[in-house]
Image (cartoon, rainbow, N blue to C red):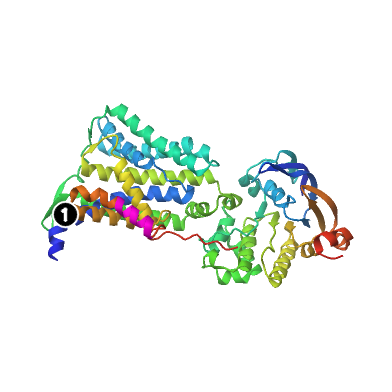
Amino acid sequence: MEFLTANLPYILAGISVGGQYALIAIGYTMVYGILRLINFAHGDVFMVAGLVMVYLTTVFPMWLSIPMVLVITVLLGFAIERAAYKPLRNAPRMSIMISAIGVSYLLQNCALYFTGGLAKVYPQIPWISKTVTIGGATTKMVTLITPVIAIVLIVVLVIFIKKTKIGMAMRAVSKDFETSQLMGIKINAVISATFIIGSLLAAVGSMLYFSNYASVVPTSGAMPGLKCFVAAVFGGIGSIPGAVIGAFIIGICENLIKGVGWTTFSDAFTFALLIVILLVKPTGLFGEKATDKV
Amino acid sequence: MLKINDLKVNYGGIEAVKGISFEVPEKSIVTLIGANGAGKSTTLRTIAGLIKPAAGTVTFQDEVITGKGPQEIVSRGITLVPEGRKIFPDLTVLENLRIGAYLRKDDLTDDLNWVYDLFPRLKERHWQHGGTLSGGEQQMLAVGRALMSRPKLIMMDEPSLGLAPLVVRGIFDIIREINKQGVTILLIEQNANMALQTADIGYVMETGKITMTGPGKELLANEDVKAAYLGKK
């Protein structure tokens, strides 16, 4: 109990960061599930969503900027898939992976060009930037609502995938392209839908994340991107519940480590975790073992 | 109903199908038999739109459908039951059936009942994941899934592969039953005996060419066919 009260701010921050990571990690895990591609550009899409918000709010009011950020991020994710991944559909997997790395650096360098390398101050979103006190710990409203928003979106997503026709098509395509085509499923439409969902969640994640960190630089996407990738691997890449649980575990552990006073070690922990998982349980917590029935 | 004219297909750098022509009349059962690598599967996959042919035409109900994509082919009423069944292991039996009707927007109740009548086992197991079914049940599911698109022509790629003899007989009974209900069937098989007994017309394929043709019963009695495919001398 004493541990709990002493570390409450860190636990709260951890749950909040975990929710943000979860929203990004879903993009990795869904794209991997369908294309067997690690979309290295995903973290940078998240960063671009942050920058777009910065620039849009200088012109438009907040209530208009938020939906515009969502739409622009979705379009960006869609365009990346069409331009950089779709033409490589039948190429070896390594080619498309390298293309993803290329897109990642392209986005970072475009951001560098537009920002001039300066940190851009993220606009305050009213209400969620408000300070609140809970159980003696002072925090921002965003810390409290992040896990709520994350969980709601994830539940909606899981229902969407379980219950709708396009969700069923996604599950089918992730197993077998060719047989899915024989059912009349348009593979490209399903893949686009996957990128659209991933980008949408990353855009929501970026609003919550940057409201907490207050500034955006061109490399802002790199570290959260990598950590969310670790979260996806930890949970078992391809599995949505796995990515979410992995993200929360990483978020909470990181912040508890900060609480103990090892702040500089908190990032290293995440990557040490990655190495341990790959050694001990390469399929992750909920990873599927390939079973073939002949 | 389906006419193949001088079809040539290159696959994996070799000419797998070297100019074949054949016809599938409406409401008939037609079989292509032949050894491994004769080009049978390639032929079906080309008709289904998965592979683009190098030359020749595929005509279905007097319309040329050569080189059209799989969605277009399915929507015109041709489905392929792929080799190795290829059911979706993580989808339930019911979802597997529903996905077979992916392009349809109308009510599926009648078709589900039809499939359940043909395969009562699938009804019992409709909530199970496809991957938990036995090989024979998976083949039933694959056929049922194909029927859900309400096809005019079903193509089956080796439905008897890897199944116990008793199960194979059951599958062929179902094939005849489906045919009686008005669905045209194009079947490829290595189990030449069963296929020729069932088929109205048989074609023998060897290394990308059709070498023999005739009514199923006639081919079954043919000495060359007996020697090559039925293991009799």
Q: Amino acid at mark 1?
A: Gly
Q: Is residue B216 above or below residue B125?
A: above
Question: Neighbour class for label 1 at 10 Å: few (<14), some, many (≥20)?
Answer: some
- Number of numbered discs: 1
Pick the quarter of the image with the N terminus of chain A. bottom left
Q: Work out which residue is located at the far front of the displayed protein and give it.
A: A279
**In the figure, residue A69 lies in which quadrant?**
top left
Residue for point 72% across, 55% down: B36
Q: Which residue is mark 1?
A: A259
Secondary structure, mark 1, is: helix
Q: Nearer the viewer, residue A16 or B226?
A: B226
Residue A278 magenta: yes
Q: Nearer the viewer, residue A69 or B187?
A: B187
Residue A78 visible in this rendered orientation of the protein: no
Question: Quarter holding the C terminus of chain A?
Answer: bottom right
Q: Position of residue B26 (x, y in %)?
A: 78, 53
Magenta span covers which residues?
A271-280
Residue situated furthest left in the rendering: A136
Q: Position of residue A106 (x, y in %)?
A: 38, 32
The quadrant in which residue A257 appears is bottom left
Main secondary structure of the magenta stretch? helix
Chain that bears disc 1: A
- Residue sitting at x 45%, y 37%: A99
Q: Position of residue A195 (x, y in %)?
A: 43, 44
Q: Is residue B160 left or right of residue A153?
A: right
Q: Is residue B141 left or right of residue A68?
A: right
Image location of residue A268, percent across then percent down: 26, 49
Does residue B128 appear left or right of residue A143 in this picture? right
In the image: residue A164, left or right of residue B137? left
* Magenta segment includes A10: no
Residue at coordinates 47% horizontally, 55% vertically from top-left? A164
